[in-house]
Image (cartoon, rainbow, N blue to C red):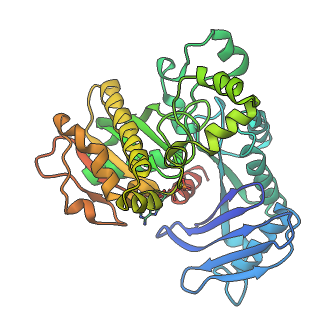
Amino acid sequence: MKILVINAGSSSLKYQLFDMADRKVLAKGLCERIGIDGSRLKHKPLNSDEIIIDKEMKNHAQAIQIVIEALTSPEYGVISDMSEISAVGHRVVHGGEFFKSSVVIDEDVKKAIEECVSLAPLHNPPNLIGIKACEEIMPNVKQVAVFDTAFHQTMPKKAFLYALPMEMYKKHKIRKYGFHGTSHKYVAQRAADILGKPIEELKIITCHLGNGSSVTAVDGGKSVDTSMGFTPLDGIIMGTRCGTIDPAIVEFIAQKEGISLSEVNDILNKKSGVLGISGISSDFRDLENAANEGNEDAALALDMFAYSVTQYIGRYMAAMGGCDAIVFTAGIGENNSKMRKKIVKTLEFAGVKIDEEKNKIRGQEIDISTDDAKIRTLVIPTNEELMIALETEKLV
Ligand code: ADP
C-alpha cells in the first residue's frame, strides 16, 4: 500500500510518499511560495538527486497537481499512476476536543476542523485547504486527518484545566491541549519496543526538543500531562518562545512599553526564549559556539533551557509516581549530547545515569544509560511523517 503524507502550510506544502510494505519513503519534497510569484517544487526521489521545478502554483490544488505529476513522471517519478496512491494522510494541527484519535475525513470532520480555526488560526486554515485540494485532485482516494493535539486528549481534567473561572472552559474551551502529539506518541511506542516491554506497563517521559519544545508524561501509553498548553507558547523555554511565565507580566509589559497586547504576544512568541536571553540566536549550535567563545548570556540561555527541561522531567516523575524511561527527540534532543548531559545531571538521585561514550553517538535509536541506571535514557529520532502514514494505514 502506498500512502501520501501531506503537511500543508499557508504558502507551502510538504509531502512524503511511503511504501508501507517496507515503510520506505519513495519520494519526498516541498512546494514553496504557493500563491506567490516564483513558486517552485523541490522533489527528491528515493534513489536519485533532488530536482527543482519552477512552475506557477496559484493555489494548493495546483501544487498538489504538480506533486502528482512529479510522482508519476516517466523521468523522475516513483509510481506509474496516481491510482497507486491508496490513501492520503494529512497533518492537522488542532483537533480541539473533537478528536481523540486520527479519523477518515468526511464533511463532519471538515466542519469540526473549521470550528477549531480560532484555536489555531495560523495552522488549521492551510491544513483544511490542503485537504480540500487533495479531495479535488483525488476524489476517490480516502483522506485521513492526524492531529497534533489528539494524543493528549487522554489527559485527566486535573491536568488539562486551568484554575480560571469554569465558564472560561465551558464558554471558550480554554484548557490545555498540548502539541507535538504525533511525535510524542511515536517515540513513546518506539521506546517500549526498544525496552522490549508492553507500553501499557511503562511510565515514559518524552522530551521533544526542537525550535518548539515540549515534554510529555506518557503513562501506560497514554499522555497524562504535557508542557505546552492552550497554545504552543506554554511550558519549557524554547528557541524564541518564553514558555511558562507569570501571566501578570503581559499587562505590565504593555503598560511599561506603551504597546498593545498583540505586540506583547509577538514579543513572547518571537523575541523571547533562548533568543531573548542570549540576544544572539534561537539556534542551539550558534549558542554553543558563542558560549564556547566566552559569551555569558549564551551560556546562561543554555543553562536556563536545560533547567526548564529538568524541572518538567521532575514534575512528571512526581505526577506519574515514577518513571521507567526518558526519551530525547527532535533537533536538539537527537543531536545535542551536551544539552542531554546538562538536562539529566541533577537527576542522578532518581536513578538517571548516562554513559558519556554512548551519549556521543548520533542519528540512531540508542539507549544511552549506564548499565546500572534505574531509569533508562533513550535517544530516538522522531518520524512524524511515518507516524501519520501508519495511522492512515490503520484507518484505511
Ligand atoms: P523544528 O521544531 O523547527 O522542527 P528542529 O527539530 O529541527 O526544529 O530543531 C532545531 C534545533 O535543533 C536547533 O536549535 C538546532 O540547533 C538543533 N539541531 C539541529 N540539528 C543539529 C545538529 N546536527 N547538531 C546540533 N544541534 C542541532
Q: Quadrant of residue 37?
A: bottom right
Please indicate, yes or no, whether residue 219 appears anywhere in the rendered image.
Answer: no
Residue 282 picture location, percent across and down = 53, 53
- The image quadrant that residue 367 belongs to is bottom left
Q: Is residue 201 above or below residue 210?
A: above
Q: Position of residue 153 (x, y in %)?
A: 54, 31
Looking at the image, the residue that sits furthest to the bottom is: 75
Does residue 353 appear left or right of residue 232 in this picture?
Answer: left
- What residue is rendered at 40% in x and 48% in y? 302
> Which residue is painted at 55% across and 19% down in the image?
161
Q: Is residue 42 above or below residue 224?
A: below
Instruction: Give percent across and percent down for residue 73.
Output: 73, 84
137 lies above or below 270: below
| Residue toward you, 392 or 119 | 119
Q: Compared to 22, does 100 lie above or below?
A: above
Residue 343 in the figure: left or right of residue 123? left
Q: Give how far across and how far down residue 61 sits, in percent.
A: 84, 63
Is 104 left or right of 209, judged from the image as shown? right
Instruction: Answer left or right for 199 relative to 75.
Output: left
Name the residue at 55% across, 44% down: 276
